[in-house]
Image (cartoon, rainbow, N blue to C red):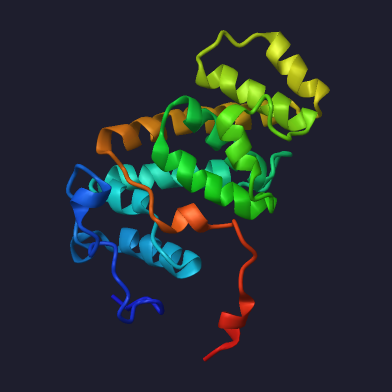
Amino acid sequence: LTSSPSSGNRLSSSDHPADKISRYPVPNKKDLPYDIVEIMEEVETKGGFLPNVFKVLSHRPAEFRSFFTYYNELMNKETGSLTKADRELIIVVTSTHNKCPYCVVSHSALHRIYSKKPSLSEQVIINYKTAELSPREVAMLDFAMAVCRCDIITEEHFRALEEAGFDREDAWDIGSIAAFFAMSNRLAHITDMKPNEEFFTMGRMPRDRSSNRQG
């Protein structure tokens, strides 16, 4: 097993006390399957820290693999008209309804980064109907919330999306994200998953690039 370039003296995924991030045991990294360690190290190298969801879900490696495979299909696909910011906004709104602190905090941070709008996610958390959203975004979130609330989905829901510029495949994407994160929200409840401190400040201020030029 080769060490990650970001290793050094940095804390590994198993160094954080498990009782601080989950009510379930968090495995030591050396006890995890190689492919899961690779995923963790890649994420940590790219983002500068390892989100606690990776640590918590590693308690069940087979489910970890399935979870992140589907997550990547939904969130990183390059087809359809949903942007990365759109996808994060759907998660913030539906996770707020489902009262999931982990997903609200972490995906608000990602929305700030992708949208370059540092206050919009907070507006949406309070009430997306009064937030500074475009008609397209409102239509998208209305559909997502209908799925989230388990409303009876009718042709009227699809027509409203189509009038805002979405097609039926986009509707599937919106609904799938709402559905997947309904599961994710409940896993976070069961495990009492805690958000990383890093998420609270991400995307709020322009990044200081001077530090990147030092050393």
The residue at the far bottom in this view is: 215
Image x and y of residue 170, in percent: 69, 31
| 125 shown above or below 160 | below
Q: Is residue 191 left or right of residue 41?
A: left
Image quadrant assignment for residue 38: bottom left
Front in this rendered view, residue 158 or 93: 93
Image x and y of residue 24, in percent: 19, 43
Q: Is residue 190 left or right of residue 105?
A: left
Whether residue 79 appears in this view of the structure is: yes
Whether residue 26 appears in this view of the structure is: no
Q: Is residue 18 left or right of residue 180?
A: left
| 120 shown above or below 37 | above
Image quadrant assignment for residue 208: bottom right
Q: Tell me what residue is drawn at x 69 percent, y 44 percent.
A: 83
Q: Tell me what residue is drawn at x 61 percent, y 46 percent.
A: 77
Q: Tell me what residue is drawn at x 41 percent, y 79 percent.
A: 5
Image quadrant assignment for residue 75: top right
| 35 shown above or below 117 | below
Image x and y of residue 79, in percent: 69, 43
Front in this rendered view, residue 63 or 174: 174
Q: Is residue 119 left or right of residue 177?
A: right
